[in-house]
Image (cartoon, rainbow, N blue to C red):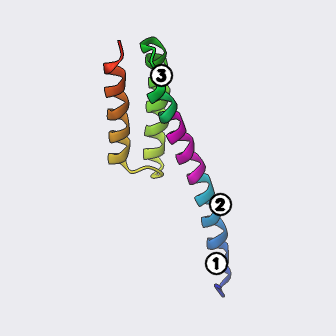
């Protein structure tokens, strides 16, 4: 266990940040999962901008790596283009 006050505080803040990051990551993954199950092109086109904004925001906050964000957006775009 840490002995310094600053280290104890750092542990507390890291724990809170970790929980918050996990929540945002899981929310994004669930949203992408739901998007990939959509079969209606109009519904997918309506959802796409919201998801792209979510992924970009997570990449900007360094919760998600920028390359991973690009891969996720590319995957969603490919799914959208395959719908008819």
Mark 1 near mark 3, Cβ–Cβ under 8 Å? Answer: no
**Circle 1 — which element?**
helix
Residue for badge 1: 6
Q: Is residue 12 toward the left or the right of residue 32 in the image?
A: right
* Circle 3: element type: loop
Residue at 67% in and 69% down:
12
Which residue occupies the foreground of this view, 22 or 61?
Answer: 22
- In front of the other: 3 or 42: 42
Closer to the eye: label 1 or 3: 3
Q: Main secondary structure of the magenta part?
A: helix
Quadrant of image for the C terminus:
top left
Compare marks 1 and 3 and give the one earlier in the sequence. Answer: 1
Of circles 2 and 3, which is in front?
3
Q: Residue 36's spot in the image, x, y percent?
A: 44, 29
Q: Residue at (54%, 38%) from the top-left corner? A: 30
Magenta segment: 21-31
Q: Badge 2, how many Cα within 10 Å: few under 14, some, many 20+?
A: few
Q: Which mark is residue 16?
A: 2
Closest to the camera, between mark 1 and mark 2, is: 2
The percent coordinates of residue 38 (x first, y second) are 47, 22
| Numbered circle sitting on residue 39 | none
* Cα–Cα span, label 1 and label 2: 15 Å
Q: Is residue 31 above or below residue 40?
A: below
**Mark 1 / mark 2, whichever is N-terminal:** 1
Task: Left or right? Give the position of 69 relative to 50.
Answer: left
Q: Which mark is residue 38?
A: 3
Q: CA distance from mark 2 to mark 3?
A: 34 Å
Q: How many neighbours does mark 1 have within 10 angstroms: few (below 14), some (14-19), or many (20 or more)? A: few
Q: Tell me the distance, in whole angstroms, between the alpha carbons under discs 1 and 3.
A: 48 Å
Q: Up-down: is 63 above or below 14?
A: above
Residue at 47%, 34% in the rendered image: 32
């Amino acid at each position: 266990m840490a002995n310094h006050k600053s280290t104890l505080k750092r542990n507390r803040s890291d724990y809170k940040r970790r929980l918050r990051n996990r929540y945002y990551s899981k929310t994004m993954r669930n949203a992408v999962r739901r998007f990939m199950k959509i079969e209606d092109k109009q519904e997918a086109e309506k959802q796409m901008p919201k998801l792209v904004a979510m992924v970009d925001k997570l990449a900007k906050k360094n919760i998600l790596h920028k390359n991973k964000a690009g891969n996720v957006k590319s995957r969603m775009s490919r799914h959208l283009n395959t719908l008819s």
